[in-house]
Image (spheres, grey):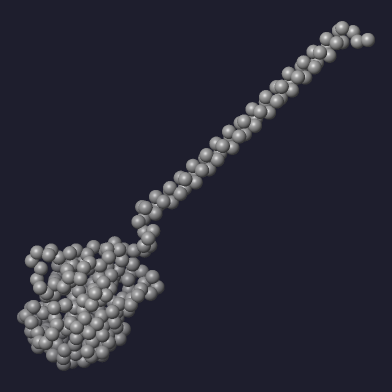
Amino acid sequence: MTSTRDRQRAAARAKLEREMAERAGRARKRRQTQAIVGAAAVLVLVVAGTVWLVAALGDDDDQDGTTAAAGAVQCAYTEVPKEGRPPQIKDVGLPQAQQPGKGTQTMTIDTNLGPITAKIDRSAVPCTAGSFTHLASKGFFDNTKCHRLVTEGIKVLQCGDPSATGKGWRDTDGTGGPSYNLAEENLPTDKRPPYPEGVIAMANSGQPGSTGSQFFIVYGDSPLDPNYTVLGTITGGMDIVKDVAKAGDDGAFAQQAGGGHPKKEITMTKVTMSPIQGG
């Protein structure tokens, strides 16, 4: 038979084993709880990190402002005040302020004497190219005459006045333009001569930021001050310009800017700008 002392020892061992089992169970539950809480904390950090990353990327896009128009250039087209505008101003609205700053375009000037073409580099003149593209799309230059030819000192044929139309010439020829001005670009300050044969450049009033629609084609090296935007390079039709120059001018501007109306009339029937290539 089992003695009383043995029964007491067995009961004590059983109690101890139950207590140890209960402690182990409680410890196991604590570890599971901690693991769950820890995993939840990691998940929160991962989600928070993802949100931060998305927000950070979004902030970069917002700061650049170029998500919708990568490589675009912000241009300022300054509207000519409506009050006091002369009738020679032709209003066809303003170009888009954001203009592509890469790629090239081909300008085609269809004339009564044949086509003249030029290559324009958007990276050099994004705002001026944008202006030309806008004006051409509105038919701004259609059926206008090149109103000025200079054959002495400099050799240029000037065009782009929307009011130089119809038969004969007017005293106001050379005073027309669009309803806005823009700043000069791509000035040839390091070139000698600044305006060599084959260049097409923008005319202005002599004041900064006065570029409009008028331009000139250089048919012989010309030592002009480098104050006029170099728009591009003539790629075809220079023989047409030289034939017009060969016929001479009437001296109408001799006492002012020089030269005169070309004796051999040249009319731009249409000006077009190709889609941007390589942009």
Toward the right, the furthest residue is: 1
Which residue lies at the image location 56% right of the left edge and 37% below the top edge? 40
Q: Is residue 82 above or below residue 192?
A: above
Which residue lies at the image location 38% right of the left edge and 70% below the top edge? 279
**In the foreground, 182 or 168:** 168
**Is 230 situated left or right of 28 in this image?**
left
The image quadrant of residue 103 is bottom left
**In the foreground, 8 or 227:** 8
Which residue lies at the image location 19% right of the left edge and 63% below the top edge? 78
Q: Position of residue 26 (x, y in %)?
A: 67, 24
The image quadrant of residue 239 is bottom left
Toward the front, the furthest residue is: 1
Q: Is residue 155 above or below residue 46?
A: below
Which residue lies at the image location 58% right of the left edge and 35% below the top edge? 38
Q: Position of residue 237 (x, y in %)?
A: 27, 87
**Is 279 situated left or right of 23 in this image?**
left
Q: How many marks?
A: 0
Q: Position of residue 278 (x, y in %)?
A: 40, 73
Q: Is residue 41 above or below residue 193?
A: above
Where is the N terminus found, in terms of image quarters? top right
Q: Is residue 99 above or below residue 65?
A: below
Q: Position of residue 87 (x, y in %)?
A: 10, 73
The image quadrant of residue 16 is top right
